Amino acid sequence: MSEHKNTSIVQLMVDFEKGSISRRDVLRRGFVLGLSAPVIASILMMGTRGAAAQDGTPAAEVEAGSTIVVPEGLRTDLGGTKVSAVLAEASSPDGPWIEAALAKFSEATGIEATWVTGETSATDRLAIYNQQFAAQSDDNDVYQIDVIWPGIVAEHAVDLSGPLADLAAQHFEAIVANNTVNGVLVGIPWFTDAGLLYWRQDLADKYAVTVPPATWADLEAAAQTVMDGERAAGNPDFYGFVYQANAYEGLTCNGLEWQVSNGGGSIVESDGKISVNNAQAIAAFDRARTWVGGLSPQGITTYQEAESLNVFTAGNAMFLRNWPYAWAASQDSPAIADKVGVGVLPMGDGEGARNAATLGGWQMMVSKYSKNQDAGIELVKYMCSPEVQLSYAVERSHLPTIASVYDAPEVAASSEFIPRLKEVFQGGAVARPSSVSAEEYNAISTIYFTELNQVLTGAKSGADAAAAMEEQMTPIMQDLGF
């Protein structure tokens, strides 16, 4: 190690120990110096630190893309090739990072990479993609696709199972399986999402209830105890549990978690078998019905993400099911900041019960109509690499799809929340049946959430709704060849 580098490291340690620089400054300067993750971690764990300096520097103060380390092994024989990638929408706060990431890729490979902005609405985005694919357009080479789209776009995708097999093996198995349609790896995971359970840690301590609850029965007992106590203390608007129960895609996500966690199957299995009409799924639906008007508001059947989050951040609920973004919102709420815990959703008590969290997130695919497929594959290889995912997590707080990235000290230093989620994706993540139902997924999901919403409103029993789901889904799956 050079004398200059030694001096720079010592100065970095001194500045951090004095509290004159933040954790993110350590990360940025550490990356520039080429320090390994363990070395950076040791600096971050040093003695006395200036709390204000450590915690008061927003991610925006880090120069966009400054933490990106270009992975080794990228091809350099494609210089002069141009690739266009449809990524985030124009208004995305990730924009500066994306531009910096593409600039570093171009510098390293000689491939000229351009960011094409996508539509904000996922529905609108997919419609435009389908128009381009139908025309076999070669305007764009790489597309950012939703986790429920692989079955819809598979016929238009380059199979990445060969050229990016080693990279795919590093990603969470459940997501790679979701992205594989009839043996074709449609996309490589870029960043992910999953359903999570949030709770009021201060109230858990106050009422001596165990969190996170291991089972739904445990959640019910804890929610009832806290709700009774808070209402007796003068808050009649306090509830035990809020979630998403309106008739829309969010209820498909919640319902899938309920039934899988109770050993009730995955609506439609990977072999095309409709499995939703079974005793354990029905029991899960009927259990959720008992929450409405009791542990949960009567109006929960109209709640989407925002409504349930608002109840929780106002300090009026013990438990919340939502997505990872809700963590930041909870910390911005004066009512509950620094009082919130987060972890995996409970399991049921049926045979085969387990923790379950519905997958969300985005992948990258290469269009088979691209004239520059090799360059597109290199861009996907770069953007979905451990090195670039690490930077995306550190600078933009997106959840990685590679387990090892969760263990990086840089991630914990920038967001102590992210490492807690590794177990969710390794053990409990479940995919919606979008790959097997392909272009008919929306029809399958609509049947599911419409019928389940009727259970929650009391219009139907779980058994009647499950039977109706199966009856309506059967001809759809038969038309698909199952």
Image (cartoon, helix red, strand yellow):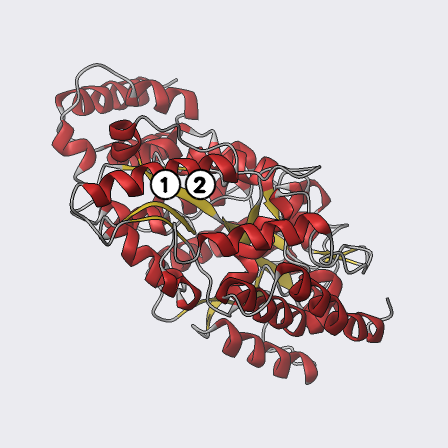
Task: Give the residue at x 70% y 59%.
Answer: 186
Query: For the C terminus, which image quadrant?
Result: bottom right
Q: Secondary structure at mark 1?
A: helix
The amino acid on which the numbered mark 1 sits, given as a three-letter code, is Gln
Which residue does the image show at 17% across and 24% down from the upper left?
Answer: 15
Q: In the image, is residue 198 above or below residue 129?
A: above
* Residue that protrudes farthest toward the right in the picture: 481
Res 173 → quadrant: top right
**Counting other residues with Cα less than 10 Å from the Cα at mark 1, is it few (<14), some (14-19), or many (20 or more)?**
some
Task: Give residue 224's mark.
Answer: 1
23, 440: nearer the viewer: 440
Q: Are marks 1 and 2 in contact (CB under 8 Å)?
A: yes
User: Relative to residue 250, is residue 194 depicted above or below?
Assistant: above
- Give 231 or 161, whichever is nearer the viewer: 231
Query: Looking at the picture, how far across and down is residue 206, in whole percent?
Result: 24, 29
Mark 2 — residue? Answer: 220
Q: Would residue 425 appear left or right of 65 to someone viewing this image?
A: right
The image quarter in which residue 91 lies? bottom left
Residue at 66% x, 39% y is: 350
Tag 2: residue type? Glu
Q: Residue 24: x percent and y percent?
A: 27, 36
Q: Residue at x 61, y 62 (%)?
A: 461
